[in-house]
Image: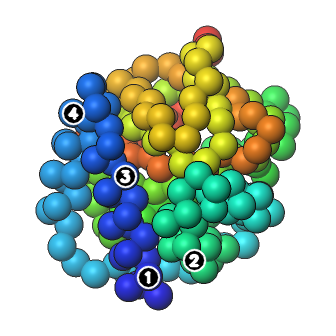
Amino acid sequence: MSAELSRLVARLRARLNRADGRAGREAVHVQRLLDRIAHDPAPYGANAHPLVRHLPAALAGLERDAPDLAALLGPLAAGLPWRHGYEASAELADLHLNMGWAEFVGPAAPWRSDEVCLGLTLIGPNTHYPAHQHPAVELYHVLTGVAEWSSHWRRPGAFVLHDSNQIHAMRTGDEPLLALYTWSGDVVSPSVWSRQP
Ligand SMILES: [Fe+2]
């Protein structure tokens, strides 16, 4: 399984090379940090997160938008360590059932790093991810589905860069969103909800 995961992560890293402008500079920085991680991935276990019910539709979209990635991710997707990192609350309704991520590189990921994260975010259709912020610089790359960040709808292939502690929010369209994300800088401090969008 680690060889298949390594191939998937290598293909995701290759996608970062498509970034240009400010996002491109961040992608180069992330690649340099990733180059310093040499060990094999640690074992990981699936956690049967309710989010995985969105995987069939997300993988169907990925087959259309990035078939090479769909072939690599499909056999692994349901067994990845999907999780949701925020506390459930009444205000957020069922967000914890519809938004989460599987991290491949990070402080608690199969490839351990305290300076860079790389993973996949999966968000169900028509889901609002409220305003939040974190010290880490964040780079999203949309793989399938569409989402609105700061009044701009982003389609597959788009890159979205968030500076350290920049407040940001997003909402998805009628299909699940599957996006590559990276964090760099202070990747240990968690994301927190913001008072203002
Ligand atoms: Fe973020």
Q: Nearer the viewer, residue 46 or 34?
A: 34
Neighbour tally class for label 2: few under 14, some 14-19, many 20 plus, Cα within 10 Å: some
The label on residue 58 is none
Q: Nearer the viewer, residue 114 or 124?
A: 124
Neighbour tally class for label 4: few under 14, some 14-19, many 20 plus, Cα within 10 Å: few
Dot 1: what SS? helix
Please name the residue that numbered disc 3 is placed on: 15
Mark-to-mark CA distance, 2 and 3: 18 Å
The label on residue 76 is 2
Q: Which of marks 1 and 2 precedes in the sequence?
A: 1
The quadrant holding residue 2 is bottom left
Please name the residue that numbered disc 1 is placed on: 4
Neighbour tally class for label 3: few under 14, some 14-19, many 20 plus, Cα within 10 Å: some
Q: Which of marks 4 and 3 precedes in the sequence?
A: 3
Mark-to-mark CA distance, 2 and 1: 8 Å
Q: Nearer the viewer, mark 2 or mark 3?
A: 3
